[in-house]
Image: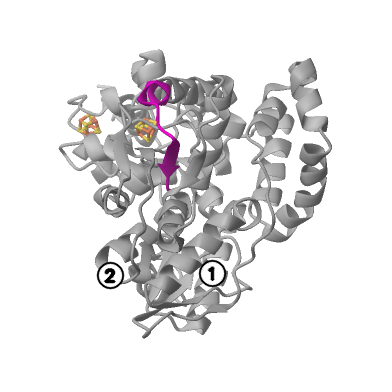
């Protein structure tokens, strides 16, 4: 009698280095509660572009029933990593860990086209290097101040260029004077805390006014602010894009810089960076030299609005007659769970009227480098957001992430609105200083 065939398990499409956790995948009960808040599902109504669908694709690959092929990868490239699905999930599925592991596997096993590779390499070479961003300030300032930008936009010449270049141009921030934060900003009045300030890359070079406002507000509230000048990029963009090795190297350097600063708290004011540094314990879990130090570092990290909300306020707030629409950054509300603190801080400013933007769980399309690598989806989402903001007749939009700031500014401009978009801390700073925004 011939031997009966023995079924051999199919081989996983993932390698053994931190594949997406089977346990987390199994936690998904396919209820679909996450679907209405998933931006890509909202846009396209496609199951495989929903959290549930993506988790199913991970399961297939884990079981060897799917390979890491271009079609499979496209559903993960289209994910914004916004984590709205995690907030909505009643089963506590940690989609963040799944997508981070999946993206790292994709970058190891999926050969991207030459154009994609060059584009991504260019983005990481620029946006993770404050020194290179600083060099870009001058040509960008010349482009804006000379009137060339207005001319280019009015004649529509950019339509002749690839979409990705058009997106980059549309997202360009309006550059103002540089306001570098010194290594030490002394506390005003008696010192209550010694805090470190994570300067960010885009924030440091393109929104120096946000860092300057952060340092002033912290100092006014009795914090000595230490801003280590040698701090590198924290690696957020790289982690979120699956570039694991580069992200780990930057995380180690960031920890080194802040250990030398000997601070009680590490303050972040860019939500994408904040959610990344709070996760260093997980990121560096395999590194015997850094695993414990990363946990200590991560436990000290707080968003600026968390720090201010827990410090009984000492600096008097002057009235600001403004109607403010508050936009929740995904990496603040979903990844860090910070929702009430910025609202509470804004609502405490006399005469300020706070208004909510509908669909606040849904991403504006910024999402790290997403708006540069997936410009169509990003623009569709930010146009949708701008259309929800416009009827609110706000004088200003407040948010907690430089990416959201750029994205909303450009979509409001496309809608013919010039409503300023600022960081929450800039409004607090204006109120404490008694100056108009
Ligand atoms: S992270 Fe955002 S885009 Fe990705 S699956 Fe979750 S909700 Fe959808
Ligand atoms: S809400 Fe959670 S359990 Fe339900 S389908 Fe989405 S990820 Fe799965």
Q: Quadrant of the N terminus?
A: top left
Residue, far top: 45
User: Relative to residue 426, is residue 68 depicted above or below?
Assistant: above
What's the residue at 57%, 54% (across, down)? 203
Find disc 2 in the rendering and name its residue. Answer: 311
Residue 187 percent across, percent down from the top left: 44, 80
Queried whether the magenta region covers residue 381, the answer comes back as: no
Q: Secondary structure at mark 1?
A: helix
What span is in magenta? 388-400
What's the residue at 52%, 83% (across, down)? 260
What's the residue at 38%, 77% (across, down)? 222
| Observer-nearest of 286 and 192 | 192
Q: Left of 106 or right of it: where is 303?
A: left
Residue 254's label in the rendered image is 1
Residue 110 percent across, percent down from the top left: 58, 35
What's the residue at 42%, 69% (across, down)? 218
| Residue 117 in sight from this viewpoint | yes
Q: Residues within 10 Å of mark 2 (few under 14, many from 20)?
A: some
Q: Left of 31 or right of it: where is 226?
A: right
Q: Residues within 10 Å of mark 1 (few under 14, many from 20)?
A: many
Quadrant assignment, res 317: bottom left
Residue 47 percent across, percent down from the top left: 33, 18
Q: Left of 49 or right of it: where is 354?
A: left
Quadrant assignment, res 87: top left
Quadrant assignment, res 145: top right
User: Relative to residue 39, is residue 340 depicted above or below?
Assistant: below
Residue 227 percent across, percent down from the top left: 55, 73
User: Relative to residue 41, is residue 15 depicted above or below?
Assistant: below
| Observer-nearest of 353 and 171 | 353
Q: Left of 112 or right of it: where is 344?
A: left
| Observer-nearest of 56 and 437 | 437
């Amino acid at each position: 009698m011939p031997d009966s065939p023995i079924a051999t398990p199919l081989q996983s499409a993932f390698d053994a280095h931190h594949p997406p956790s089977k346990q987390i995948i199994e936690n998904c009960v396919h209820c679909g509660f996450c679907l209405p808040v998933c931006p890509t599902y909202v846009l396209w109504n496609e199951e495989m572009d929903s959290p549930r669908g993506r988790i199913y694709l991970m399961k297939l690959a884990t079981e060897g029933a799917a390979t890491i092929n271009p079609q499979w990868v496209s559903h993960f490239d289209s994910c914004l990593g916004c984590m709205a699905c995690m907030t909505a999930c009643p089963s506590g599925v940690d989609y963040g860990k799944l997508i981070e592991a999946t993206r790292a596997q994709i970058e190891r096993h999926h050969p991207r086209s030459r154009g994609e590779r060059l584009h991504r390499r260019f983005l990481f070479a620029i946006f993770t290097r404050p020194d290179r961003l600083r060099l870009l300030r001058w040509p960008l300032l010349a482009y804006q101040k000379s009137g060339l930008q207005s001319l280019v936009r009015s004649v529509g010449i950019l339509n002749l260029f690839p979409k990705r270049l058009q997106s980059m141009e549309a997202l360009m921030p309006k550059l103002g004077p540089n306001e570098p934060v010194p290594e030490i900003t002394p506390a005003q009045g008696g010192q209550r805390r010694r805090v470190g300030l994570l300067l960010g890359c885009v924030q440091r070079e393109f929104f120096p006014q946000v860092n300057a406002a952060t340092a002033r507000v912290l100092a006014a509230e009795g914090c000595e602010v230490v801003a280590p000048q040698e701090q590198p990029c924290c690696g957020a963009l790289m982690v979120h894009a699956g570039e694991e090795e580069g992200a780990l190297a930057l995380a180690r350097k960031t920890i080194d810089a802040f250990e030398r600063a000997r601070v009680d708290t590490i303050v972040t004011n860019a939500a994408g960076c904040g959610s990344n540094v709070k996760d260093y314990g997980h990121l560096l879990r395999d590194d015997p030299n850094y695993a414990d130090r990363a946990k200590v570092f991560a436990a000290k990290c707080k968003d600026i609005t968390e720090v201010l909300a827990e410090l009984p306020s000492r600096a008097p707030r002057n009235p600001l007659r403004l109607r403010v629409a508050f936009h929740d950054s995904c990496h603040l509300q979903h990844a860090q769970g910070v929702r009430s603190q910025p609202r509470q801080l804004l609502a405490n400013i006399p005469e300020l009227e706070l208004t909510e933007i509908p669909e606040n769980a849904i991403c504006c399309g910024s999402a790290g480098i997403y708006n540069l690598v997936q410009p169509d989806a990003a623009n569709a989402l930010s146009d949708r957001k701008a259309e929800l903001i416009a009827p609110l007749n706000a004088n200003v939009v407040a948010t907690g992430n430089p990416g959201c700031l750029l994205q909303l500014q450009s979509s409001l401009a496309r809608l013919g609105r010039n409503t300023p978009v600022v960081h929450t801390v800039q409004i607090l700073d204006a109120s404490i200083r008694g100056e108009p925004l």
